[in-house]
Amino acid sequence: MPYFHDWVEAILSKMTHSYKPILCLSIIKNVSKTTTGSQTISKETISSDVARFYWEIHDNGFQIRHGPTKNIVDDLVQHAIRKTKLNKPNSRISWRQLSNTLKEPSTPGGTTYLEKIWKKLEDQPFNYMNIPQRTLILTTSGIEIPSDSVRTINSDRKILYDASILKLIDFLGKFNRSNSPNIAQKVRKAWKGGGRPSYPSWIVSALEFAHPKPRNCELQINGKCTVIATEWDHVIPWSHIGDHDIWNLMPICSRCNSDKSNKKPIMSYIRKTETRNSLLLNQLNTNPPKSISAAKLQDLKVQLQIANTSSLLRTNRQSMP
């Protein structure tokens, strides 16, 4: 299957920015699953998909280096975010709001953000992908995918998707090992979109089991605390950890949570959470709640055991700037 090998070679070839696998993911996503003839994906669609990935990174607060050199596309997205926020300085902007800004000129009388992003994609990675024209054709309106290439994508969509995601994770992992853990989770969340996911029900059940109501705020910042906890806090901030891990969640009041935000947690809070984790692991081993399935219960116990033996809270705190 020469077309399949063309795609795999393009995905796995050398790269200096994160554009290429994101571009491949956009092509794989937008090729119709029902059409067998050639297809054209517009440059606006491709540019929007690439821009949305970078926006999701920022919207989640993830601090990620995108490569060894300056990332022009990420800079353009950040500029558009700042421009959008001029009318909503204290509000979280939505993708719809940002996508409208991306269709506007980035400078008075200049080209739009999306056009500039497309120009960057034309320069790189297209010049470095070495994909034969039988597989992908760059046109003035976007990317034409010939019919044989469409059939290849449809028959091997999952393999090509996984290869692109793993290439992106591997590339970004090289530049974020010390300052941004859990790159795989962050990349998958950013491409999937939808913002921060809700807490899994079994995680909430375990937390409520460990902290029955009325539950106290475990941080208790002087002058801020209302004592009664109404929220769950990521001890190591969500922006750094990128997941809802049982060993990293504690009850907190809204005022303390707002004040703590994504700051580095104090050591007394780390020690308190470690103590809670040890107690919770013992409770799950000796008297587990019936509301959690056996499989999820085992997952929780493994998470807590690893967190305790590997000092995950301290390790992640040390990696924070």
Image (cartoon, rainbow, N blue to C red):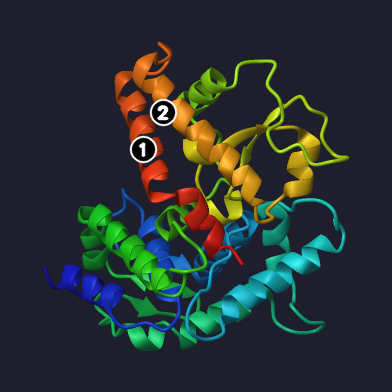
Q: Residue at x 85, y 53 (%)?
A: 90
In the figure, is residue 224 to the left or right of 151? Answer: right
Q: Quadrant of residue 290?
A: top left
Residue at label 1? 305
Image marks 1 and 2: residues in contact by CB distance under 8 Å: yes
10 Å neighbourhood of mark 1: few (<14), some, or many (≥20)? Answer: some
Q: Residue at x 75, y 84 (%)?
A: 110
Residue 39: image location, x then y, percent: 36, 64
Q: Quadrant of residue 217?
A: top right
Residue type marked 2:
Leu
Viewer-closest of 261 and 152:
261
Residue 292: image location, x then y, percent: 40, 18
Which of disc 2 and disc 1 is earlier in sequence? 2
In the figure, is residue 93 to the left or right of 283? Answer: right
Residue 306: image location, x then y, percent: 36, 43
In the figure, is residue 279 to the left or right of 136? Answer: right
Tell me the element at label 2: helix
Residue type marked 1:
Gln
In the figure, is residue 205 to the left or right of 132? Answer: right
Q: Is residue 292 above or below residue 198?
A: above
Tell me the element at label 1: helix
Q: Is residue 7 visible?
A: yes
Residue at label 2? 281
Viewer-closest of 321 and 79:
321
Q: Which mark is residue 171?
A: none
CA–CA distance in space, label 1 to label 2: 7 Å
Q: Residue at x 63, y 57 (%)?
A: 61
